[in-house]
Amino acid sequence: MTHRDVVVWGGGCGGVAAALQSARSGADTTLFTPGPWLGGMVSSAGVCAPDGHELTCWQTGIWGAFLRQLELEEPSGLDHNWVSCFGYRPQTAERILQRWVAAEPRLDWRPHCRLEQVYGQQGRLQSVEIHSTNGVESYSADVFVDGSDLGDLLALSSAPFRWGWEAKEIWDEPSAPEQSRLESEAFFQEQPIQSPTWVVMGQLHGELDPRQAAAIPRIPFDRSTASFGLEKTITYGRLPSGLVMLNWPLEGNDWHHSLDRALSADGEVRAELAQEMQRHSKDFLAALEDCSGGWITSGNAFPGADPSLALMPYWREGRRLMGRTTVTERDLLPVSKQALRGPLPIDAQGRCTSIAVGTYANDHHYPGEDWPLAPKSVRWGGRWSGTPFCIPFDALITDSIPNLVMAEKGFSVSHMANGATRLQPLILNLGQVAGLAAAMAVRQGCDTADLQVEAIQSALIHEPQAPAAVLPIWDWPLWHPHWVKAQEQGLAQPEHLDAMGRLSGPRSSLLPPGVNQAPNQPHEVGLSGVLTGNLHEGYHLETAEKIWPLITLEPAIHRWLSDEDHSGRTLNLRGIKNPWGPWVRITGVMDQAN
């Protein structure tokens, strides 16, 4: 039997983040993945237009480091679609992650593995049995991390977990159904979790023939273009080089049927589900190819027999840990009607226990009409953004197995809250926390529950390669020299982080960053034109070339636009054009021409 400090069962992006941070924090770590790639949602599942964490104040941790490296390695940049501010090829993401993994001498990555069994004793995990290319191998460890999308390691342990819906009566979540509905309506048995998608990649060829613009895909996809039209339906997930991510929820390639099969112990049953999902997505691509007159065809993005098909499905939800605390919908929602952040998790000693910030609005995928969800969005910087919320450390661990840490979307979260916590940026950063905590527990010879949350928070803020925010402070992007001080000041006196996500109070000596301080970014251009519009209806810049809608991801620019009336003025700006948004993403204000 081989012993390692930390063993990570992965396949999800939280798994690779956990393994990286564990090794970087000094623990001898082995990462096992079932497939040939290790990036989960961000690469092997093909979800390459991430949602959430788009603002520079949220571009921290491994997510922020990953994003900045993508900007350097995609020759044409990341501004290629209208659903996200970031679009990249899965090959690029996987290349970055594999290079990072290879650079860590304490990290051993083992692809093409199958988790066969988990062994425990006296309430602790002792070892895992892995089927690899070498046959059956056993690995023991001090700490085990589940970094899989469906909670595979969790399922084989004795730790209790959740699957599916919870009634409104449990946590009084505004959007949850009552117990009577769960018991009487067939929908909740037929749709236990959010619908997954097997991403398929298309390739665009030139421009869409105007004669095809009103074409409708064949049944059963004939309603997929009703809301946005053919061109916008297809370019929703446009990536560099005209590659297209097809992950379309509106009568597109989400899969809704017999999802309980994902938990089956029978490999043939799981394989049947996979084949159905793949066939459905390929049929969707074929329908779009036919009705667009060949504008979109099969793309080339993944290794294997069919390079258009992702290597794994995009699971939005799986098994969920029953942890020391559970994140519910009420933990996501703004603390008041006009507030710009959710509640801070405060323990009995008055300490804020947040170890990561989530920002996504809340989004559930089911067949039929959208599920009505309590709103948590705000118009910000010319776009709609989700108000930020906190994840407490106790949501990653359980008292039932003290040496198990969750690193993926299966941490302790309710079904309703999962719609806002399942996205790539947050999961990368939660994986980072899981790996850090695992390594700290090994180094200190204690259980993760015995770690001081202040030590975890400080290590995240001061992490040399990927410093991570633990508090939802809007004003301070990572690039600003006061970012660390702002995070530390908020932790020292959380009562001085107001409902708008701003630091206040007698100890707050920090001033918001100036509008011109953001560093230059790749693909920036200078623009000069007349500004029109307002914060609520949106801004436009009338240039000699065209009228561009404007957005920004910089808090200081948003504040500058909000605090003064610049409408009608001629401005000199720097920004990045996205013709498919379409918009210009403003990165700096050079001066006001008059």
Image (cartoon, rainbow, N blue to C red):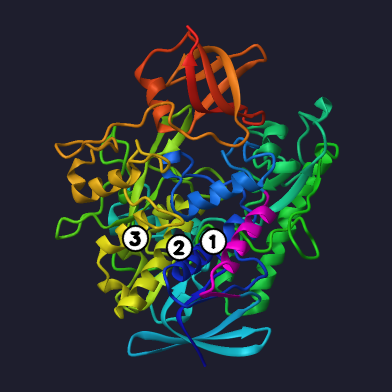
Which range is magenta?
89-109
Sequence-wise, which precedes: disc 2 or disc 1? 1
- In the picture as drawn, the residue positioned furthest to the right comes out as 293
Seen in the picture, residue 493 relative to 98 is either above or below; the reply is: above
Q: How far apart are marks 2 and 3 (CA)?
A: 14 Å
- Which amino acid type corresponds to the residue marked 3 in the rendered image? Ala
Which residue is labeled 3 in the image?
Answer: 459
The secondary structure type at the circle numbered 2 is helix
Instruction: Tell me the crowding category of disc 2: few under 14, some 14 to 19, or many 20 or more residues within 10 angstroms, Cα based.
Output: many
Q: Residue 13 carries which label?
A: 1
Residue 562 position, x and y percent, is 38, 21
Q: Nearer the viewer, mark 3 or mark 1?
A: 3
- At 37% from the left edge and 47% from the top edge, which residue is drawn? 175
Q: In this view, does 413 lie above or below 541?
A: below
Q: Is mark 1 on a helix, strand or loop?
A: helix
Please state which of the two labelled residues, at mark 2 or mark 3, is closer to the viewer. Answer: 3
- What residue is pinned by disc 2? 431
Q: Are marks 2 and 1 in contact (CB under 8 Å)?
A: yes
**Relative to the observer, which residue lies in front, 377 or 512?**
512
Instruction: Residue 180: give x, y in percent of width and height.
Output: 36, 57
- Residue found at x 49% / y 41%: 54
Residue 260 place in picture, x, y as percent: 55, 68
Disc 3 packing (10 Å; few <14; some 14–19; many ≥20): some
Relative to 120, say whether 389 is above or below: above
Disc 1 packing (10 Å; few <14; some 14–19; many ≥20): many
Residue 284 visible in the current orientation: no
- Horizontal side of 556 relative to 579 (left or right) equals left
Of 536 and 176, the residue lying toward us: 536
Which of the two labelled residues, at mark 3 and mark 1, occupies the earlier sequence position?
1
Amino acid carrying label 1: it is Cys
